[in-house]
């Protein structure tokens, strides 16, 4: 069974202001979340790390395979009314945030759709909750705030007003960040195609390398 609730995703309307976005609590099914968290990469430092550089268990590897696979692409293409076939995926993983993280910014134009999924069981800090803001300058003037918990998905299509960030906080904030990107985007790490990405993830998960 899929770890992802595409029925809930499909039933959730796409918001249009200030950009196309969707917020889906428990997009990762509750019954799958504990195992995925058990197999989450053992990252010890703040920051975002390319998935290809990490080691993790089989249930996390299965999630990576689903997120980068054709079913996910098809549902997002339908929801955002956009042909995603020309665009490869890029994925990074975060486990910890630092007090300097979260500044308001807009994504590069080469990022077509940004997908954020959160894995904490609960959240009690004021900081660390993503906000889609009205400007680059005021964190407290925002459209929506996203608690980083329980498989919540927040995804948006980049435009000239898709500003986002989060108030400062510290500690564990488990996140997957995935993007459909322009093929010409120059990355620090070469973007992997779906088969190669999944093959490497499964090899790591089962200690086959």
Image: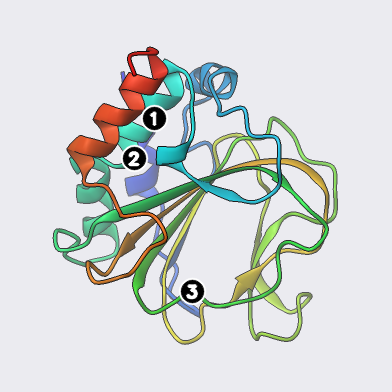
Determine which of the numbered discs, if any, sits on residue 63 in the image: 1
Q: How far from the left and from the top, in percent, is residue 49?
A: 53, 46
Which element carries disc 3, helix, strand or loop?
A: loop
Q: Earlier in the sequence, mark 2 or mark 3?
A: 2
Query: Is 83 located above or below residue 142 in the figure?
Result: above
Q: Earlier in the sequence, mark 3 or mark 1?
A: 1
Q: How far from the left and from the top, in percent, is residue 98?
A: 78, 53
C-alpha separation, residue under disc 2 versus residue under disc 3: 20 Å
> Residue at coordinates 53% horizontally, 16% vertically from top-left?
35
Which element carries disc 2, helix, strand or loop?
A: helix
> Residue at coordinates 65% horizontally, 86% vertically from top-left?
135
Label 2 crowding class (10 Å Cα cut-off): few <14, some 14-19, many 20+? many
User: Are the two marked residues, 3 and 1, in contact with CB atoms closer than 8 angstroms?
Assistant: no
Front-most of 203 and 113? 203
Front-most of 82 and 109? 109
Q: How far from the left and from the top, in percent, is residue 190?
A: 31, 55
Determine which of the numbered discs, if any, sits on residue 67 in the image: 2
- Asked if residue 3 shows in the view, the reply is no
> Residue at coordinates 22% horizontally, 58% vertically from top-left?
77
User: Are the two marked residues, 2 and 3, in contact with CB atoms closer than 8 angstroms?
Assistant: no
Label 3 crowding class (10 Å Cα cut-off): few <14, some 14-19, many 20+? some
Locate the C terminus and report the quarter of the image it occupies: top left
**Residue named by callout 3:** 107
C-alpha separation, residue under disc 1 versus residue under disc 2: 6 Å
Determine which of the numbered discs, if any, sits on residue 10 in the image: none
User: Are the two marked residues, 1 and 2, in contact with CB atoms closer than 8 angstroms?
Assistant: yes
């Amino acid at each position: 069974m899929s770890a992802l609730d595409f029925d809930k995703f499909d039933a959730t309307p796409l918001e249009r202001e200030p950009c196309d976005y969707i917020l889906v609590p428990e997009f990762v099914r509750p019954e799958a979340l504990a195992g995925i968290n058990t197999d989450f990469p053992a990252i010890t430092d703040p920051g975002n790390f390319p998935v290809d550089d990490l080691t993790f268990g089989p249930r996390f590897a299965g999630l990576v395979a689903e997120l980068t696979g054709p079913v996910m692409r098809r549902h997002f293409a339908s929801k955002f009314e956009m042909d995603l076939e020309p665009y490869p995926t890029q994925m990074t993983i975060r486990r910890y945030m630092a007090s300097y993280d979260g500044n308001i910014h807009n994504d590069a134009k080469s990022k077509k759709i940004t997908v954020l999924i959160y894995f904490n069981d609960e959240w009690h800090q004021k900081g660390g909750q993503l906000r889609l803001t009205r400007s680059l300058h005021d964190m407290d003037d925002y459209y929506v705030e996203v608690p980083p918990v329980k498989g919540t998905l927040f995804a948006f299509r980049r435009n000239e007003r898709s500003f986002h960030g989060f108030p400062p906080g510290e500690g564990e904030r488990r996140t997957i960040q995935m993007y459909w990107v322009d093929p010409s985007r120059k990355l620090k790490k070469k973007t992997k195609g779906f088969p190669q990405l999944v093959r490497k993830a499964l090899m790591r998960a089962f200690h086959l390398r």
